[in-house]
Image: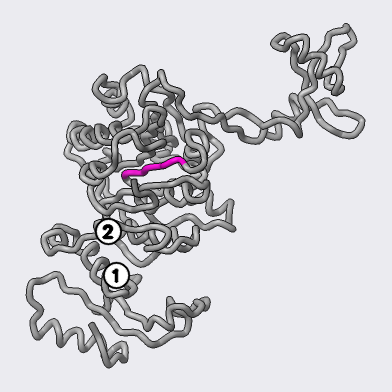
Amino acid sequence: METNVIYCGDCLLKLKEIPSDSIDLIYIDPPFSSNRNYVAFWQEQEKRHFEDRFENVQAYLDYMKPRVIELYRVLKTTGSFYYHCDWHASHYIKVLLDRDDLFGYSNFRNDIIWRRATPIGGKVKSKMFPRDSDHILLYCKDARQKVTFNNTYIPYREKYVEKFFYHQDPNGRRYALQTLGDYSEKSIEEFEKNKKIFTTKKGTKRLKQYLDESKGMLVDDIWEDIRNVRQAQVQNMHRVERLGYPTQKPEALLERIIEASTKENDIVLDAFCGCGTTLVTAQRKKRRWIGIDISPTACRVMAKRLEDTAGLKEGKDFIIKDLPKTIEELRVYPAFEFQNWAINALGGVPSKIKVRDKGIDGKLYPIEDIKKEKKEGLDLFGDIDRYIPIQVKRTDQVGRPDIENFEVAMKRDKREKGI
Protein backbone atom coordinates (compact mmCIF):
# COMPACT_ATOMS: atom_id res chain seq x y z
CA MET A 1 0.00 0.00 0.00
CA GLU A 2 1.26 3.45 -0.89
CA THR A 3 1.85 5.87 1.98
CA ASN A 4 2.95 9.49 2.12
CA VAL A 5 0.33 10.19 -0.52
CA ILE A 6 -2.35 12.88 -0.84
CA TYR A 7 -5.54 11.87 -2.63
CA CYS A 8 -7.50 14.70 -4.21
CA GLY A 9 -11.20 13.88 -4.24
CA ASP A 10 -14.16 12.78 -2.16
CA CYS A 11 -12.98 10.44 0.59
CA LEU A 12 -16.00 8.21 -0.04
CA LEU A 13 -14.42 7.24 -3.36
CA LYS A 14 -10.74 7.49 -2.45
CA LEU A 15 -11.07 5.30 0.66
CA LYS A 16 -12.10 2.43 -1.62
CA GLU A 17 -8.52 2.39 -2.92
CA ILE A 18 -7.17 1.62 0.58
CA PRO A 19 -7.09 -2.03 1.74
CA SER A 20 -9.20 -3.20 4.67
CA ASP A 21 -7.59 -3.40 8.14
CA SER A 22 -4.52 -1.41 7.07
CA ILE A 23 -4.57 1.87 9.04
CA ASP A 24 -3.28 2.27 12.61
CA LEU A 25 -4.82 5.66 13.40
CA ILE A 26 -7.61 7.65 11.78
CA TYR A 27 -8.27 11.28 12.72
CA ILE A 28 -10.98 13.27 10.97
CA ASP A 29 -12.12 16.85 11.41
CA PRO A 30 -14.95 16.96 8.84
CA PRO A 31 -17.17 19.95 8.12
CA PHE A 32 -19.37 20.54 11.15
CA SER A 33 -23.11 20.89 10.78
CA SER A 34 -22.73 24.51 11.81
CA ASN A 35 -25.01 26.12 9.19
CA ARG A 36 -22.60 28.93 8.42
CA ASN A 37 -20.08 30.01 5.81
CA TYR A 38 -16.39 30.46 6.46
CA VAL A 39 -14.24 32.83 4.48
CA ALA A 40 -10.75 31.42 4.19
CA PHE A 41 -7.54 33.19 3.36
CA TRP A 42 -5.05 30.67 2.04
CA GLN A 43 -1.62 32.13 2.75
CA GLU A 44 -3.10 35.48 1.64
CA GLN A 45 -3.11 34.16 -1.94
CA GLU A 46 -6.71 33.06 -2.16
CA LYS A 47 -9.95 34.29 -0.72
CA ARG A 48 -12.74 31.80 -1.14
CA HIS A 49 -15.97 30.76 0.52
CA PHE A 50 -15.60 27.56 2.47
CA GLU A 51 -19.12 26.12 2.50
CA ASP A 52 -20.07 24.37 5.72
CA ARG A 53 -23.78 24.07 5.28
CA PHE A 54 -26.25 21.20 5.43
CA GLU A 55 -30.00 21.42 5.08
CA ASN A 56 -30.47 19.77 8.48
CA VAL A 57 -28.80 17.39 10.92
CA GLN A 58 -30.14 14.34 9.12
CA ALA A 59 -28.56 15.53 5.87
CA TYR A 60 -25.24 15.83 7.69
CA LEU A 61 -25.55 12.31 9.14
CA ASP A 62 -26.55 10.91 5.75
CA TYR A 63 -23.42 12.51 4.31
CA MET A 64 -21.12 11.14 7.02
CA LYS A 65 -22.50 7.61 7.46
CA PRO A 66 -21.18 6.00 4.23
CA ARG A 67 -17.80 7.67 4.80
CA VAL A 68 -17.59 6.37 8.38
CA ILE A 69 -18.41 2.87 7.08
CA GLU A 70 -15.37 3.07 4.79
CA LEU A 71 -13.19 4.46 7.58
CA TYR A 72 -14.23 1.58 9.84
CA ARG A 73 -13.33 -0.89 7.10
CA VAL A 74 -9.76 0.39 6.57
CA LEU A 75 -8.94 0.66 10.31
CA LYS A 76 -6.88 -2.15 11.86
CA THR A 77 -8.45 -4.20 14.65
CA THR A 78 -5.77 -2.72 16.94
CA GLY A 79 -6.31 0.81 15.62
CA SER A 80 -7.94 3.96 16.99
CA PHE A 81 -10.46 6.36 15.47
CA TYR A 82 -10.75 10.04 16.50
CA TYR A 83 -13.76 12.05 15.31
CA HIS A 84 -13.35 15.80 15.94
CA CYS A 85 -16.62 17.74 16.13
CA ASP A 86 -18.24 20.61 18.01
CA TRP A 87 -21.47 21.18 19.91
CA HIS A 88 -23.60 21.25 16.76
CA ALA A 89 -23.34 17.55 16.02
CA SER A 90 -21.28 15.70 18.65
CA HIS A 91 -24.24 13.96 20.29
CA TYR A 92 -25.73 12.96 16.93
CA ILE A 93 -22.37 11.65 15.71
CA LYS A 94 -21.91 9.55 18.86
CA VAL A 95 -25.30 7.89 18.33
CA LEU A 96 -24.23 7.13 14.76
CA LEU A 97 -20.87 5.68 15.77
CA ASP A 98 -22.43 3.62 18.58
CA ARG A 99 -24.48 1.60 16.08
CA ASP A 100 -23.68 -2.11 16.04
CA ASP A 101 -23.04 -2.05 12.29
CA LEU A 102 -20.37 0.65 12.82
CA PHE A 103 -17.97 0.99 15.76
CA GLY A 104 -20.48 0.00 18.43
CA TYR A 105 -21.11 1.28 21.95
CA SER A 106 -18.68 -1.22 23.53
CA ASN A 107 -15.80 0.21 21.48
CA PHE A 108 -16.32 3.78 22.66
CA ARG A 109 -13.28 4.91 24.68
CA ASN A 110 -13.46 8.65 25.43
CA ASP A 111 -15.32 11.87 24.84
CA ILE A 112 -12.31 14.19 24.95
CA ILE A 113 -13.10 17.82 25.68
CA TRP A 114 -10.65 20.25 24.09
CA ARG A 115 -10.89 23.75 25.52
CA ARG A 116 -9.85 25.99 22.66
CA ALA A 117 -9.30 29.01 24.97
CA THR A 118 -11.20 31.42 22.74
CA PRO A 119 -14.92 31.61 23.63
CA ILE A 120 -17.46 31.70 20.80
CA GLY A 121 -20.71 33.55 21.36
CA GLY A 122 -19.56 34.85 24.74
CA LYS A 123 -21.55 38.07 24.72
CA VAL A 124 -22.85 39.31 28.08
CA LYS A 125 -26.46 39.36 26.85
CA SER A 126 -26.35 36.09 24.90
CA LYS A 127 -28.43 34.14 27.50
CA MET A 128 -26.07 31.18 27.41
CA PHE A 129 -22.65 30.13 28.62
CA PRO A 130 -19.77 30.86 26.20
CA ARG A 131 -19.02 27.97 23.85
CA ASP A 132 -15.35 27.32 24.34
CA SER A 133 -14.75 23.64 23.59
CA ASP A 134 -14.75 20.92 20.95
CA HIS A 135 -15.47 17.22 21.33
CA ILE A 136 -13.09 14.52 20.10
CA LEU A 137 -14.80 11.11 20.16
CA LEU A 138 -12.34 8.23 20.52
CA TYR A 139 -13.27 4.71 19.42
CA CYS A 140 -11.31 1.54 18.89
CA LYS A 141 -12.30 -1.04 16.30
CA ASP A 142 -12.24 -4.05 18.61
CA ALA A 143 -11.87 -3.62 22.38
CA ARG A 144 -10.94 -7.29 22.68
CA GLN A 145 -7.70 -6.67 20.79
CA LYS A 146 -4.50 -5.18 22.17
CA VAL A 147 -5.21 -1.65 21.01
CA THR A 148 -2.17 0.63 20.72
CA PHE A 149 -2.29 3.27 23.45
CA ASN A 150 0.52 5.18 25.17
CA ASN A 151 -0.12 7.26 28.28
CA THR A 152 0.93 10.86 27.80
CA TYR A 153 1.97 13.39 30.41
CA ILE A 154 2.19 17.14 30.82
CA PRO A 155 4.38 19.10 33.27
CA TYR A 156 2.90 19.78 36.70
CA ARG A 157 1.44 23.23 37.19
CA GLU A 158 3.44 25.57 39.39
CA LYS A 159 0.74 25.67 42.08
CA TYR A 160 0.59 21.87 42.15
CA VAL A 161 4.36 21.65 42.61
CA GLU A 162 4.25 24.15 45.46
CA LYS A 163 1.40 22.28 47.15
CA PHE A 164 2.70 18.69 46.92
CA PHE A 165 6.45 18.84 46.19
CA TYR A 166 7.32 21.10 49.10
CA HIS A 167 9.88 18.73 50.72
CA GLN A 168 13.53 19.16 49.79
CA ASP A 169 16.67 17.07 50.20
CA PRO A 170 19.83 18.82 51.46
CA ASN A 171 20.94 19.04 47.82
CA GLY A 172 17.77 20.94 46.92
CA ARG A 173 15.86 18.13 45.14
CA ARG A 174 12.12 18.57 45.63
CA TYR A 175 9.92 15.60 46.43
CA ALA A 176 6.41 14.62 47.48
CA LEU A 177 5.45 11.78 49.83
CA GLN A 178 3.21 8.87 48.95
CA THR A 179 2.08 5.72 50.77
CA LEU A 180 3.70 2.34 50.26
CA GLY A 181 0.50 0.30 50.37
CA ASP A 182 0.67 -0.80 46.71
CA TYR A 183 4.33 -1.87 46.75
CA SER A 184 5.80 -5.31 47.54
CA GLU A 185 8.34 -5.94 50.28
CA LYS A 186 11.02 -6.42 47.65
CA SER A 187 10.23 -3.03 46.11
CA ILE A 188 10.32 -1.33 49.51
CA GLU A 189 13.73 -2.86 50.21
CA GLU A 190 14.94 -1.46 46.87
CA PHE A 191 13.58 1.98 47.79
CA GLU A 192 15.41 1.89 51.13
CA LYS A 193 18.61 0.85 49.40
CA ASN A 194 18.33 3.90 47.12
CA LYS A 195 17.46 6.18 50.06
CA LYS A 196 13.98 6.92 48.78
CA ILE A 197 12.16 6.15 52.03
CA PHE A 198 11.12 8.93 54.42
CA THR A 199 10.14 8.05 57.99
CA THR A 200 7.69 10.38 59.73
CA LYS A 201 7.88 11.35 63.40
CA LYS A 202 5.28 8.69 64.11
CA GLY A 203 7.46 6.05 62.45
CA THR A 204 5.36 5.73 59.27
CA LYS A 205 7.34 5.06 56.13
CA ARG A 206 6.61 7.05 52.98
CA LEU A 207 8.07 6.94 49.49
CA LYS A 208 9.89 9.99 48.17
CA GLN A 209 8.54 10.90 44.75
CA TYR A 210 11.18 13.21 43.30
CA LEU A 211 9.99 15.97 41.02
CA ASP A 212 12.92 15.57 38.61
CA GLU A 213 12.10 11.86 38.19
CA SER A 214 8.39 12.32 37.64
CA LYS A 215 6.83 12.04 34.18
CA GLY A 216 4.41 14.79 35.11
CA MET A 217 0.64 14.81 35.25
CA LEU A 218 -1.20 12.07 33.37
CA VAL A 219 -3.31 13.56 30.57
CA ASP A 220 -7.00 12.85 31.10
CA ASP A 221 -10.02 13.49 28.87
CA ILE A 222 -10.13 17.26 29.42
CA TRP A 223 -7.43 19.08 27.43
CA GLU A 224 -6.91 22.65 28.56
CA ASP A 225 -3.20 23.06 27.91
CA ILE A 226 -3.33 23.25 24.09
CA ARG A 227 -4.18 26.61 22.58
CA ASN A 228 -5.91 27.21 19.27
CA VAL A 229 -3.80 28.13 16.24
CA ARG A 230 -4.10 31.89 16.69
CA GLN A 231 -3.03 31.87 20.34
CA ALA A 232 -0.42 29.18 19.74
CA GLN A 233 1.20 31.40 17.15
CA VAL A 234 1.39 34.28 19.62
CA GLN A 235 2.99 32.03 22.25
CA ASN A 236 5.32 30.15 19.88
CA MET A 237 6.72 32.75 17.54
CA HIS A 238 9.44 30.34 16.42
CA ARG A 239 6.89 28.05 14.73
CA VAL A 240 4.33 29.81 12.56
CA GLU A 241 1.38 27.50 11.91
CA ARG A 242 -1.48 29.79 10.98
CA LEU A 243 -2.38 29.52 7.29
CA GLY A 244 -5.81 31.14 7.31
CA TYR A 245 -7.78 27.89 6.98
CA PRO A 246 -11.04 28.47 8.90
CA THR A 247 -11.01 25.30 11.02
CA GLN A 248 -7.24 24.76 11.23
CA LYS A 249 -6.18 22.80 14.31
CA PRO A 250 -2.85 23.25 16.17
CA GLU A 251 -0.05 20.78 15.59
CA ALA A 252 0.20 20.20 19.35
CA LEU A 253 -3.30 18.70 19.32
CA LEU A 254 -2.43 16.20 16.59
CA GLU A 255 0.92 15.50 18.21
CA ARG A 256 -0.83 14.33 21.38
CA ILE A 257 -3.24 12.11 19.45
CA ILE A 258 -0.51 10.57 17.30
CA GLU A 259 1.80 9.92 20.23
CA ALA A 260 -1.02 8.34 22.25
CA SER A 261 -2.33 5.95 19.61
CA THR A 262 0.62 5.03 17.37
CA LYS A 263 4.26 4.06 17.40
CA GLU A 264 6.99 4.95 14.91
CA ASN A 265 6.35 3.81 11.32
CA ASP A 266 2.61 3.28 11.93
CA ILE A 267 0.17 4.60 9.31
CA VAL A 268 -1.95 7.68 10.06
CA LEU A 269 -4.95 8.63 7.90
CA ASP A 270 -6.81 11.95 7.73
CA ALA A 271 -9.75 11.80 5.32
CA PHE A 272 -10.63 15.53 5.60
CA CYS A 273 -7.10 16.86 5.89
CA GLY A 274 -7.68 20.51 4.94
CA CYS A 275 -4.38 22.35 5.22
CA GLY A 276 -2.42 19.23 6.24
CA THR A 277 -1.80 19.60 9.98
CA THR A 278 -2.17 15.84 10.53
CA LEU A 279 0.26 15.03 7.73
CA VAL A 280 2.93 17.49 8.84
CA THR A 281 2.72 16.29 12.43
CA ALA A 282 2.79 12.61 11.45
CA GLN A 283 5.87 13.23 9.33
CA ARG A 284 7.63 14.97 12.22
CA LYS A 285 6.79 12.08 14.57
CA LYS A 286 8.20 9.56 12.06
CA ARG A 287 4.87 8.01 11.09
CA ARG A 288 3.70 7.15 7.59
CA TRP A 289 0.61 8.97 6.44
CA ILE A 290 -2.24 9.24 3.93
CA GLY A 291 -4.28 12.40 3.37
CA ILE A 292 -7.53 12.95 1.47
CA ASP A 293 -9.26 16.22 0.63
CA ILE A 294 -11.84 17.15 -1.97
CA SER A 295 -10.32 20.58 -2.66
CA PRO A 296 -7.48 20.80 -5.23
CA THR A 297 -6.41 24.06 -3.61
CA ALA A 298 -6.17 22.38 -0.21
CA CYS A 299 -4.05 19.62 -1.70
CA ARG A 300 -1.66 22.19 -3.16
CA VAL A 301 -1.51 24.15 0.08
CA MET A 302 -0.64 21.07 2.14
CA ALA A 303 1.96 20.03 -0.44
CA LYS A 304 3.68 23.39 -0.08
CA ARG A 305 3.45 23.10 3.71
CA LEU A 306 5.12 19.66 3.62
CA GLU A 307 7.89 21.11 1.49
CA ASP A 308 8.36 24.25 3.61
CA THR A 309 8.09 22.76 7.11
CA ALA A 310 9.15 19.13 6.67
CA GLY A 311 11.67 19.53 3.85
CA LEU A 312 9.90 16.96 1.65
CA LYS A 313 9.95 17.06 -2.14
CA GLU A 314 6.81 16.36 -4.16
CA GLY A 315 7.35 13.43 -6.51
CA LYS A 316 10.24 12.12 -4.44
CA ASP A 317 9.14 12.02 -0.80
CA PHE A 318 5.37 12.22 -1.36
CA ILE A 319 2.90 12.35 -4.23
CA ILE A 320 -0.47 13.96 -4.97
CA LYS A 321 -2.93 11.71 -6.77
CA ASP A 322 -6.04 12.45 -8.79
CA LEU A 323 -5.84 16.20 -9.21
CA PRO A 324 -8.62 17.06 -11.71
CA LYS A 325 -7.72 16.67 -15.38
CA THR A 326 -10.96 16.41 -17.34
CA ILE A 327 -13.25 19.21 -18.45
CA GLU A 328 -16.16 17.49 -16.74
CA GLU A 329 -14.33 17.47 -13.40
CA LEU A 330 -13.21 21.08 -13.73
CA ARG A 331 -16.68 22.35 -14.60
CA VAL A 332 -18.07 21.46 -11.16
CA TYR A 333 -15.41 23.40 -9.21
CA PRO A 334 -16.18 26.85 -7.81
CA ALA A 335 -14.71 29.74 -9.80
CA PHE A 336 -11.77 30.36 -7.44
CA GLU A 337 -10.93 26.63 -7.36
CA PHE A 338 -10.79 26.53 -11.17
CA GLN A 339 -8.76 29.72 -11.34
CA ASN A 340 -6.27 28.38 -8.81
CA TRP A 341 -5.99 25.07 -10.68
CA ALA A 342 -5.31 26.79 -14.00
CA ILE A 343 -2.59 29.05 -12.57
CA ASN A 344 -0.93 26.17 -10.72
CA ALA A 345 -1.07 24.05 -13.88
CA LEU A 346 0.96 26.74 -15.66
CA GLY A 347 3.46 26.88 -12.79
CA GLY A 348 2.29 30.34 -11.83
CA VAL A 349 1.52 32.00 -8.52
CA PRO A 350 -2.07 33.11 -7.77
CA SER A 351 -2.54 36.80 -7.01
CA LYS A 352 -3.10 37.76 -3.38
CA ILE A 353 -6.20 39.75 -4.33
CA LYS A 354 -9.16 37.88 -5.81
CA VAL A 355 -11.67 40.72 -5.95
CA ARG A 356 -10.83 43.87 -7.94
CA ASP A 357 -7.56 42.32 -9.10
CA LYS A 358 -7.48 44.66 -12.13
CA GLY A 359 -7.43 41.75 -14.55
CA ILE A 360 -4.31 40.00 -13.24
CA ASP A 361 -5.23 36.65 -11.65
CA GLY A 362 -1.68 35.31 -11.32
CA LYS A 363 1.93 35.71 -12.34
CA LEU A 364 4.40 33.37 -14.00
CA TYR A 365 8.00 33.92 -12.88
CA PRO A 366 11.14 32.64 -14.65
CA ILE A 367 12.28 29.45 -12.92
CA GLU A 368 15.79 30.80 -12.29
CA ASP A 369 14.33 33.75 -10.34
CA ILE A 370 12.07 31.67 -8.11
CA LYS A 371 15.10 30.29 -6.28
CA LYS A 372 16.19 33.76 -5.15
CA GLU A 373 15.62 34.85 -1.57
CA LYS A 374 12.59 36.97 -0.75
CA LYS A 375 13.27 40.44 0.65
CA GLU A 376 11.06 42.11 3.24
CA GLY A 377 8.59 44.60 1.86
CA LEU A 378 9.08 43.62 -1.77
CA ASP A 379 7.30 41.32 -4.18
CA LEU A 380 6.78 37.57 -3.65
CA PHE A 381 10.20 36.78 -5.08
CA GLY A 382 12.15 39.74 -3.70
CA ASP A 383 13.04 42.53 -6.08
CA ILE A 384 12.17 40.50 -9.19
CA ASP A 385 10.23 42.48 -11.76
CA ARG A 386 10.26 39.81 -14.47
CA TYR A 387 6.94 38.03 -14.71
CA ILE A 388 4.19 37.22 -17.19
CA PRO A 389 0.66 38.14 -16.03
CA ILE A 390 -2.03 35.44 -16.19
CA GLN A 391 -5.77 35.97 -16.57
CA VAL A 392 -8.27 33.10 -16.26
CA LYS A 393 -11.71 33.16 -17.87
CA ARG A 394 -14.31 30.58 -16.89
CA THR A 395 -16.09 30.62 -20.26
CA ASP A 396 -16.33 28.31 -23.25
CA GLN A 397 -15.16 31.07 -25.60
CA VAL A 398 -12.94 34.10 -25.08
CA GLY A 399 -13.99 37.06 -27.21
CA ARG A 400 -12.19 40.11 -28.53
CA PRO A 401 -13.42 42.36 -25.65
CA ASP A 402 -11.83 39.95 -23.14
CA ILE A 403 -8.50 40.09 -24.94
CA GLU A 404 -8.60 43.87 -25.27
CA ASN A 405 -9.37 44.28 -21.56
CA PHE A 406 -6.46 41.99 -20.73
CA GLU A 407 -4.18 44.03 -22.96
CA VAL A 408 -5.16 47.13 -20.98
CA ALA A 409 -4.28 45.29 -17.77
CA MET A 410 -0.94 44.23 -19.23
CA LYS A 411 -0.06 47.79 -20.26
CA ARG A 412 -1.00 49.02 -16.81
CA ASP A 413 1.52 46.50 -15.42
CA LYS A 414 4.03 47.44 -18.15
CA ARG A 415 4.05 43.89 -19.52
CA GLU A 416 4.68 42.95 -23.16
CA LYS A 417 3.54 39.32 -22.79
CA GLY A 418 0.56 37.75 -21.08
CA ILE A 419 -1.20 34.40 -20.78
Q: Any magenta on residue 268? A: yes
**Residue depicted at 43% across the width and 63% down the height:** 313
Q: Are marks 2 and 1 in contact (CB under 8 Å)?
A: yes
Quick check: 57 left or right of 156?
left
Q: Which residue extends farthest right? A: 170
Magenta highlight range: 266-271
Identify whether 99 is placed above or below 312.
above
**Residue depicted at 56% across the width and 38% down the height:** 225
Q: Is residue 123 visible?
A: no
Q: How crowded is the residue under tag 2: few (<14 C-alpha within 10 Å), some, or many (20+)?
A: many
| Mark 2 residue type | Pro
| Mark 1 residue type | Asn
The residue to which callout 2 is attached is 296
Identify whether 262 is placed above or below 395.
above
Residue 395 picture location, percent across and down: 10, 71
Residue 188 picture location, percent across and down: 79, 14
Q: Is residue 292 visible?
A: yes
Q: Which residue extends farthest front? A: 1
